[in-house]
Amino acid sequence: MATVTGMPRVALFAPCFMATLRPVDARHAERVLRALGDEVTVIEGRCCGQPAFNSGYRDEARATGRELLRAAQPHAVVVTPSASCVSMVRHYLPTTFEGERNVAAQSIGNRFREFADYVANHPALDSLSLRLPGVMAYHDACHARRELGLTGAILGLLGRVEGLEIRRLHYEEECCGFGGAFSVKHAEVSAAMMAAKLADVGSTGARVLVSTDLSCLAHLEAGARGLGMALETWTVAEVLSRALP
């Protein structure tokens, strides 16, 4: 959908955990979208319902997710800097509805696009001048890799940033251990997985870790602090925002 000025019109859904933990990342995403020429409407104060769904509370997930679907309904494209939220809205939230409501939920859910995927396939991407010298390790978030298949698109996008060296992890396919409620219900297992991931990050020599999902990064950053490890965590949105002129 385009406006009368010809600029693409999109909605940017800032996930609830991002709005709580690091709202500046939503601003980074918005800055990149505007640099691409998009007209952006921000959807805030909503949740996709994933925490309730993963804990077995389908009614609560449906009620929470319904509010997001209502906010998204007027928009043809909804960009979200969270692969896990996109996966939830596309694949799982519709299953909490029946009949025509299931069809409607699926229709709206299919409008959601993960931020890095949207930017990587944007027709105006070549117009961006991106430069950010430095070295970063890359964490491949589970939902981005396994459910959405975005690894190639994300790495290709980061590869466009002049001067940036991305170092891959040895055990890239391993989960960081967060998994939302998993880290609470199985704290010891989660902590062990986190420590293994941080050891892998440390082996790269990079002091900055980049990923699509702030949820993974927040988990790993907290673990790094606890282990006395010097590590900054940046979302892909922040990398691209800082790489703009």
Image (spheres, rainbow, N blue to C red):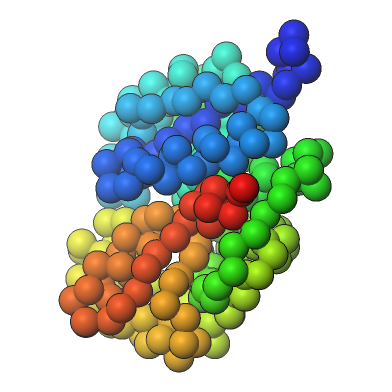
Residue 229 x/y as whole percent = 28, 81
Picture quadrant where residue 77 is located: top right
What residue is rendered at 52% in x and 22% in y?
A: 41
Q: Is residue 208 left or right of residue 119?
A: left
Judge left or right: residue 22 versus residue 39: left
x%, y% of residue 49?
Answer: 36, 37
Q: Which residue lies furthest to the front in this view?
A: 245
Asked if 142 appears above or below 1 in the picture, the reply is: below
The residue drawn where x is 72% and y is 46% is 128
Q: In which quarter of the image is the N terminus?
A: top right
Nearest to the observer: residue 23 or residue 101: 23
Image coordinates of residue 22 in percent, x first then y, are: 32, 47
At x 50%, y 87%, the residue is 204
- Vertically, is 82 above or below 135? above
Q: Is residue 16 visible?
A: yes
- 46 vs 238, left or right, is left
Taking the image as drawn, is residue 107 in sight? no
Count of marks, rendered view: 0
Query: Which percent across, then down, holds residue 35?
Result: 64, 36
Q: Residue furthest top?
A: 4
Between residue 225 and residue 216, name the one nearer to us.
225
Residue at point 71% right, 24% down?
Answer: 8
**Vertical arrangement, residue 11 with respect to residue 173, above or below:** above
Relative vertical location of residue 44 with respect to residue 122 in this rendering, above or below: above
Q: In which quarter of the image is residue 152?
A: bottom right
